[in-house]
Image: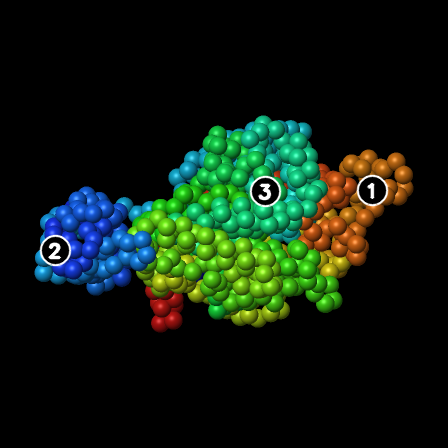
Amino acid sequence: MFDGIVVSQCYAVEQRYSHRFKVHVLRAENVTKGALGDLLDTPDPYVELFIPTAPESRKRTRHIDNDINPTWNENFEFILDPNQDNVLELTLMDANYVMDETLGSTSYNISQLKVGQMELVPFLIGKATTVYLELCLEVCSAMDLRFSLALCDKEKLYRQQRRERVMLAIKKLLDTEKPRFLPSSLHEVPVIAIIGSGGGFRAMVAFSGVMKALYESGVLDCATYVAGLSGSTWYMSTLYSHPDFPKTGPEQINKELMKRVSSNPLRLLLPQHITNYVHALWSKKAGGQPVTFTDIFGMLIGETLIPARMDTKLSELQEKINEAQSPLPLFTCLHVKPDVSELMFADWVEFSPYEIGMAKYGTFMTPDLFGSKFFMGTVVKKHEENPLHFLMGVWGSAFSILFNRVLGVKDMPGGSTMEEELEQIKPEHIVSEDSLDDEEPRKAGVEDDHQHAQASWIQRMVTSLFSDSSLFNTREGRAGKVHNFMLGLNLNTSIPFSPFTEILTPNSPDEEVDAVTDPDEFDRIYEPLDVKSKKIHVVDSGLTFNLPYPLILRPQRGVDLIISFDFSARPSDSSPPFKELLLAEKWARMNKLPFPKIDPKVFDREGMKECYVFKPKEGEKNCPTVIHFVLVNIDFRMFKAPGVPRDTEKDEFADFDIFDDPQTPYSTFNFQYSNKAFTQLHNLMEFNTLNNIEVIKDAIKDCIVTRRENRTRSSVSLSLNEIQNKKFLKRDTRVQEHK
């Protein structure tokens, strides 16, 4: 079933087929309300179907006015687990303006049906009424989830096409180099990934400068992937959703972005705007999808950054890569559990225009299905694809969680950073079952009740936002929430295996990287998701660490060079810039994934630099090189371009601190940038990137030589059987050695 493996602890999904139960509600005869009731009123009958064990358990026909022999002729489907005791409960109802009346009910054990056969079944209600149903049970042989750790076919095809483009781009970038440093075949073309960290608008603006430099220097054409987290995903969303990208580069798009962030987005929190948002969310809520504050936050971000593209969907970004003309964008969030710290347990969820899913379980879906209702790998209720702005809210939901800081209504003692506050947050603070996401009540039979429910919900939503019990004063209900697409699946025992090493068991204490002093960090990452939970909570990936390395470290992607840009907050401009990178290293070590040794003492030896290079040890195979750019102002103060001194010794425009200035505009919580602040930060990171283009070129050359010398270097694709055979073979070998 699996044709690849990604982490040392991988949960194989046991593929069990579900049943599709088809119900054709035909007609009823002699519908009665009783002798007295029939004298007073002719019934307006409808049928309600209920299967307690089904995920989409309750369905109903339309009501037919004044008819004792109604014909509905309506079809319904339920997805069932054949291992459950599935019982159909049929209720005949009479629709009324005030309250619907139950006329009678009966039940049917579905196990009586033979798979593949249709039966006409009469249901007797009371002594006189009969309801006729056609019932059919089928095996769901086609799944809506893809169970595999291999890359999807579209990404595989993209990589083939992109590699040809990258080969030409590298030759253009390195046109003055000796032939030995140029790729002579497609195999020698390295897979290069660019990644951006979180950090709110600071990260977004800084990444805009980075992408301009990479685009204009030609480095972006050499990259296969661009991955972002939180604030960086906001820039990626703005860039890739722009109708003129990639024909129009970041320069013009960044100018538009500067105008967008120059005004305060909190103006969108005026009551008239909020009321419009809440009305828009009602259709989502009424359709059966969960709604939380993250939905509203996503609307705020969308209206600020992509107001003309609020209907854009993630799947539509495929047109930006359909000819491999741009790097494949990857976005991320976390799945967290309500009762476990996200620093201990979190599943990384990856998003691309092709697929959304979790590599830990080898479970993926097309983007249009994310948010739909699943059971046993099959969609039981398809919802419209969520707009890109909803995903932007999820990807950057740390700001939804700490929205009171964004509003400026609450200051933390000691001026704590966002990162320090997030470390104190536990999932139960943000994922409680708030009243805005209560389950839909049993639906009444008339439209007036629907309208009443809508008005009531909208009133409660608006009141909760602006009353003393406002969501602004509590973190509850802030996490994003979607239907659990792994509901009803069966997870087999984890398979401890690394495709890159002979070690088949979790790391021993001696092997653990000592990057982080907290012994609880990632302590429970090997635990599985709860496949019985109807919904899952999704939050900003920065809650665990602030760089999206897990997306890029998937062995199937076989990345050779990672150009990493870290815009995370630091206590001061002179503070060591390796905290997030060290966390990524620890995560990689615990998952048996190759990662260069990060030596934090390089800071003591070399001091603060614009970027640091961490290479694999000699002979270490399949390990990427990491170029770690940090947010720092060093040479930019003296040079207006690489090698071009400024006109004056001290240029006020360039002489600024990022974290040391108490009045800094670059606070993580600042969502309004003056044109000057935007331009300073944008130009700083553009300069830092261009100032180190030779460092990037040298790393690309090293990767080309390494691939030439290591002909076996490739992405990993092993079948589950191959993994298990190799596992047992090595176990037998060890047994023989001990005899």
- Distance (Cα) linking label 2 and label 3: 55 Å
Q: Secondary structure at mark 1?
A: loop
Q: Mark 1 — residue?
A: 653
Number of other residues with Cα within 10 Å of mark 3, as a class: few under 14, some 14 to 19, many 20 or more: some
Q: Residue at x 38, y 71 (%)?
A: 738
Q: Work out whether residue 686 or residue 184 is closer to the camera in this orientation and state it.
A: 686
Q: Earlier in the sequence, mark 3 or mark 1?
A: 3
Location of residue 530 in the rendering, given as x and y in whole percent from the top left corner: 39, 63
Residue drawn 55% across the image and 31% down it: 243
- Percent across and percent down for residue 216 are 66, 32
Q: Nearer the viewer, residue 162 or 68?
A: 68
Residue occupied by mark 3: 303
* Quarter assignment of residue 50: bottom left
The amino acid type found where label 1 is placed reads: Phe
Location of the C terminus (image quadrant): bottom left
Kindly identify which residue carries mark 2.
129
| Amino acid type shown at disc 3 | Glu
Given the image, on which type of amino acid does mark 2 rest? Thr
